[in-house]
Amino acid sequence: MQIALAKPITSERFLNIRNRTEQICLSLNSEDVSVQPVDFVSPPKWHLAHTTWFFEEFVLTKNKSDYKIFNKDFGYYFNSYYNNVGERVLRANRGLMTRPTFKDVLDYRAHVNKNMAQFLEGEIETEIYHVIEIGLQHEQQHQELLIYDIKYILGHQISFPTLDFDVKLHPENPNQQFIKIEEGVYEIGHNEDCFCWDNELGHHKVYLHDFEISNRLVTNAEYIDFIEAGGYRDFNLWHADGWDWITNNDITQPMYWYKVSNKWMYYTLSGYKAIEPDRPVSHISFYEAFAFAQWKDMRLPTEFEWEVASKYFDYGQLWEWANSAYLPYPNYTKAEGAIGEYNGKFMVNTMVMRGASAASPQGHCRPTYRNFFAPDNRWQFSGIRLAK
Amino acid sequence: MQIALAKPITSERFLNIRNRTEQICLSLNSEDVSVQPVDFVSPPKWHLAHTTWFFEEFVLTKNKSDYKIFNKDFGYYFNSYYNNVGERVLRANRGLMTRPTFKDVLDYRAHVNKNMAQFLEGEIETEIYHVIEIGLQHEQQHQELLIYDIKYILGHQISFPTLDFDVKLHPENPNQQFIKIEEGVYEIGHNEDCFCWDNELGHHKVYLHDFEISNRLVTNAEYIDFIEAGGYRDFNLWHADGWDWITNNDITQPMYWYKVSNKWMYYTLSGYKAIEPDRPVSHISFYEAFAFAQWKDMRLPTEFEWEVASKYFDYGQLWEWANSAYLPYPNYTKAEGAIGEYNGKFMVNTMVMRGASAASPQGHCRPTYRNFFAPDNRWQFSGIRLAK
Amino acid sequence: MQIALAKPITSERFLNIRNRTEQICLSLNSEDVSVQPVDFVSPPKWHLAHTTWFFEEFVLTKNKSDYKIFNKDFGYYFNSYYNNVGERVLRANRGLMTRPTFKDVLDYRAHVNKNMAQFLEGEIETEIYHVIEIGLQHEQQHQELLIYDIKYILGHQISFPTLDFDVKLHPENPNQQFIKIEEGVYEIGHNEDCFCWDNELGHHKVYLHDFEISNRLVTNAEYIDFIEAGGYRDFNLWHADGWDWITNNDITQPMYWYKVSNKWMYYTLSGYKAIEPDRPVSHISFYEAFAFAQWKDMRLPTEFEWEVASKYFDYGQLWEWANSAYLPYPNYTKAEGAIGEYNGKFMVNTMVMRGASAASPQGHCRPTYRNFFAPDNRWQFSGIRLAK
Amino acid sequence: MQIALAKPITSERFLNIRNRTEQICLSLNSEDVSVQPVDFVSPPKWHLAHTTWFFEEFVLTKNKSDYKIFNKDFGYYFNSYYNNVGERVLRANRGLMTRPTFKDVLDYRAHVNKNMAQFLEGEIETEIYHVIEIGLQHEQQHQELLIYDIKYILGHQISFPTLDFDVKLHPENPNQQFIKIEEGVYEIGHNEDCFCWDNELGHHKVYLHDFEISNRLVTNAEYIDFIEAGGYRDFNLWHADGWDWITNNDITQPMYWYKVSNKWMYYTLSGYKAIEPDRPVSHISFYEAFAFAQWKDMRLPTEFEWEVASKYFDYGQLWEWANSAYLPYPNYTKAEGAIGEYNGKFMVNTMVMRGASAASPQGHCRPTYRNFFAPDNRWQFSGIRLAK
């Protein structure tokens, strides 16, 4: 894996990125950060510690001679899926850990930050810079997951508390247009001298046929039309697995939506409110995105169509479902060791999402970025762009 | 239900009992009190609030004219199984509530305590005294459950933290003797002028045949003999359901026991330590108690045998499994309304336990007390007394 | 265990009992006898073979010198829960066995019958007679289970086929009366010189208080009143476990009942028909029987009350739920070895049923007989007798 | 959907195809054809009836004026996933249907065959011909599934019975070579005047990069090397979902393989035998195929690579896993109505298989054929071809 640095790594840049993680959690209490309401949501405390453990495990213990491990049990607690680095707490049990406490974890962060800042003052080999860069990118990805998980936790409290951190969505362009792209061979993948993940590499060619793609996302108003036209009751619109999913889970609307006294309401991080019709519809699964497109007699774009067309439209409010399974590019090779576990092992049973979201950190929005989720996931900030 | 007061209810007695609940939790942090590691364990925060809600719901809102409800959502949160008093949070979801916080709950307790103390200064009808008495007895039962639940929570932390609250077990009598009881008609049930639960009433006669019963509980040393003789591998000793239970759950020893480097260790609320051979074996299910007795060619006493023989031996370290299903006494009638939901509805699929434990509050140890648990429960302080 | 013979064992008696098993299955086809629609129902083919295996395993291979085992794999297939006699096919997988076929099993029966008939011509030790007696009683118990299982299988076919074997219910006595029994010491258990199961022994005394008991069972008409009065919607009538059971399984009426065009219909072995109001209500669980009695402000009798009162009323149409858990009598000792596995291991989590049913074979109806089922079972021929 | 006829439809061709279905089942008994050992396996009786129902429902009742429906309930029983044609028996309950019997189903087939033969003598509109063609192709697909399902049923009998129908595998070419294909634009999809499924249409271009592909499948001998090198214990070789799958299901070898006394054995439809090292490895999931390729430092081909390269190698022994998710081709449109439910609704969570197998009927082997299975399926005749 060829890793370019996003920007030079200074202790200032390091601490800026690290501090943002804590800022996200600023209005949370000890209970909020410890709970795991459902398997796929990790306690915020876990994110705070896991991202810190990355620097301790892969940078400090290996390279800073006077580094003292904060607590030797933390490696066991806060390893996520790195099977190569020893045992780990089962994902579904993360919410049972009441110790270490929130305060312990903040102390852990301070300890590692101080050591990293010292370490960054010295001379560092290029290869270590690359590991630190990955650590920072990794932390930023967790910042986004952290926001999803916090929304899930707060959105399942009866009192619907708000979060003091800005992740607002803006109205979509009221003038929908379909951009035409011509048949031909196009280039795909990352090809510049800046940071990207291994799954974007393997720059290669694809052949695309004529297609058209919308200049904006589907809005809440349009999605309400779909619901009220019976979209969730017509199995012809759905994949077989999607139909089973809505049937078995009684799904009749996006996550966080409620119909109260015949009025559509939703929970957002700035509170519980009437649904804003001009905002892009969010918290929908791939199954729902697909069914909506079927109902419109259109389809979702492939990830290659999206990448080619992306210079012609705005994006970045919500991750956009592609009708592409997450698979390796030609000549994809995964990195050696624990770092290599990061992407390749998820290349089955997941669908690609392109773009970025209001919850994405700076620098995580680029046309070649490949995000991926299971087709029934919808706690992430997901949206729909139509193609035909 | 005829309810006698345990003792006169003064605000001093009221606050003494209430304060003990908080003392149990004194060394816990916000995370410890919020987690629900498994369905049958409730978060300590929930116990703290639920016992408080009892006084708010059944005493203050009905009888104190100037009472202001602390927070109208709390009835929804902290009702347990009183189906008669409206919707309730599903038992398995109690651990998802991060709000109200620990601090909110302590404020709730202070608010209700203050109002109750004021209320107890005034004149009160006898019937209300009875409800308060039940509320206090109820709180004390929760104090015991609270200790079981805290032990479960702390005992599942990797660091095995201790609790600053005394629940130590003492050595059993080294001289085992079997007390003989003669055949005949005996009287059973509560018959005195002091508080008891409705399930102890219906004073009645039973006919017992000759039997013998041990003067002490089975010790850890004896139980280790059972394990090492292969007791968990010989299905002839077990009920069919017990055998399925140990097989499906890989049960090979009591809860909180570990065999490390060929040495038996256990977790207690005063820490992780080598098993003390002279202490009574605890945290065993009815299935295990039964199998142990089979292995000894003896049996467990029935609850009637236990009650009749109890004046001849010491008890109170651990609840003792009886080979009696929890069923109503002749002429049992359950109380009207929500209070009546308390006992009768559990009179199927549970087994009786007699005595009391080191975790029982004062006044909860009497020969007629009927406790009950499912035959696979073992997070409670349970032990074995043999009969033949 | 002291075993008395029900009647002298001749080859004629032997074959009469054995042939009845086949007569029950006479109108079934190969598919009907092979299916296992749900874990607790065994394929009829399995019953036919398992009862035969008993004689091969416990009588012929041990005592008839020239006996040739029909097929050595059958021991593996057709052992039920006798853990002492080697591995067994898991109960839930019995329906996957397509081989041996129905015809193979009938050949197996003929082979064993022929050998047993020969064997019964010779001189036989008393102890072996006892084993054969148990084998015949065991076969008769399976005849009854066979009828339950066949009803379940046919009752879940869309075409509701009938069975050519008579198990009709008759109208209950239209004049209900309550028989009064006086307080005192009574004798319980088997005490005669004829066959009984080990769980009936341990003849002993019990003390009963005054009670009254109905001279007849609850009828379908009365049960319809309960349903239509909302009995299945009022949690105050139910055990906590019973309420969970009806809620989780959407139970709103007895098994095999259907409300079609506002009319109550049921499936019986003589076909699908309008419910006969004067017949005793059947296919109800312990939970339902208990809730019905609560609704009537009465209760179910204990098994001791039932046994004492049974000489004063008719019984034998349906097994009657007692409010007694199935537990050992004083001085109960289970038989040695595989035969001893029969009863004792089920003495937890089950409730006693007394009497007998229209599906019971001759000689299986006596006042001391203790049948037992889990409180949610209702595919057996179960009914309700009220007490107060 | 543009449907070309595979061959002219005569009553002779019709009956030849139909009779083959019965020939496959010739050595089965009534029990074998009725059982459903696991959700994804349908009872052979169901296949026999369901394929027949297709002609009754879509051809005869709509077009043959004097046609008498054989039994009006059969539509309910034997509809599979055609949600558009009314209620259906839940897939998991197909094994509970003991009625209609095997004989009833054979009578049903004879009735429909006779009517279809009559109908085919008359004049028929082109559109109806197309429906009949689909019915025959559909029946042939079920013939293949039937063989998978029969193997599963017989392979789970303790006696390992054989099937009298030839589906033998032959040795693979001992000389492995890697065929090189050059980078460029290639054409994909069906483009000839003969029958194909809708998922093969949408003839289109793709851009391929240089790759090499094996001239033969992976053999049993090679796969044993993988097992014995610890392939099932090295998580680095597996997808995350694959690792969970082998861990949760204790998978350590292909389906139907057994290691007995240190020797590798397997069940085949011609009996239980020592594994033949030169035959292609079969009954492996996508996860296993992927892990094997990782272990070889190679990969699986994409479906486009496979299609382009297929003119250079032999195939047809086993379906070959592609590293391609099953997704629509550009311009794919699903057919209207019930027939359109056939393919599109499965285009998520499944992986493409290419080629054909020894169990495939004549005419079902063509380079553009797209088969698909879930990544953990392995009861089908699946194999591995390597690429790099």
Image: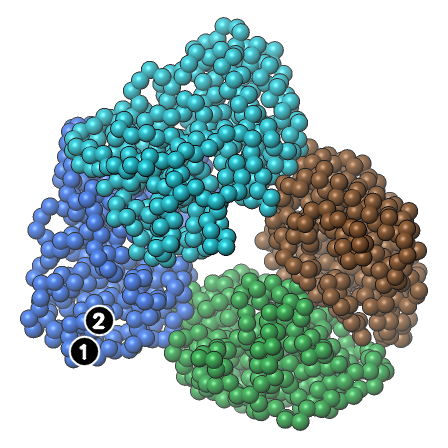
Chain colours: A cyan, B brown, C green, D blue
Q: Is residue B122 above or below residue D222?
A: below
Left or right, A161 with reference to A224: right
Asked which quadrant contains residue A375, the reply is top left
Question: x%, y% of residue B222?
Answer: 79, 50
Dot 1 amino acid type: Tyr
Left or right, D186 with reference to A175: left
Label 2 and label 1: CA atoms lie apart by 9 Å
Query: Which residue corresponds to the image point at 34% horizontal and 30% vertical from the top-left?
Result: A315
Label 2 sits on a secondary structure element that is helix
Query: Which residue corresponds to the image point at 35% horizontal and 33% vertical from the top-left?
Result: A354
Q: Could you tell me which chain the residue with mark 2 belongs to? A: D
Left or right, B96 with reference to D226: right
Left or right, B198 with reference to B346: right
Given residues D362 and A185, the one toward you in this image is A185
Given residues A363 and A344, the one toward you in this image is A363
Query: Which residue corresponds to the image point at 46% horizontal and 33% vertical from the top-left?
Result: A168
Asked which quadrant contains residue C247, the reply is bottom right
Q: Identify the disc placed on residue D56.
A: 2
* Residue C84 in view (yes/no): no
Q: Is residue C262 above or below residue B269?
A: below
Question: x%, y% of residue D113?
Answer: 18, 73
Pointers 2 and 1 in contact (CB under 8 A)?
yes
Label 1 sits on a secondary structure element that is loop
Disc 1: which residue: D67
Q: Identify the disc placed on residue A56.
A: none
Q: Could you tell me which chain the residue with mark 1 belongs to? A: D
Image quarter of the C terminus of chain D: top left
Q: Is residue B85 above or below residue B331?
A: above
Query: Which label's residue is closer to the chain start, 2 or 1?
Result: 2
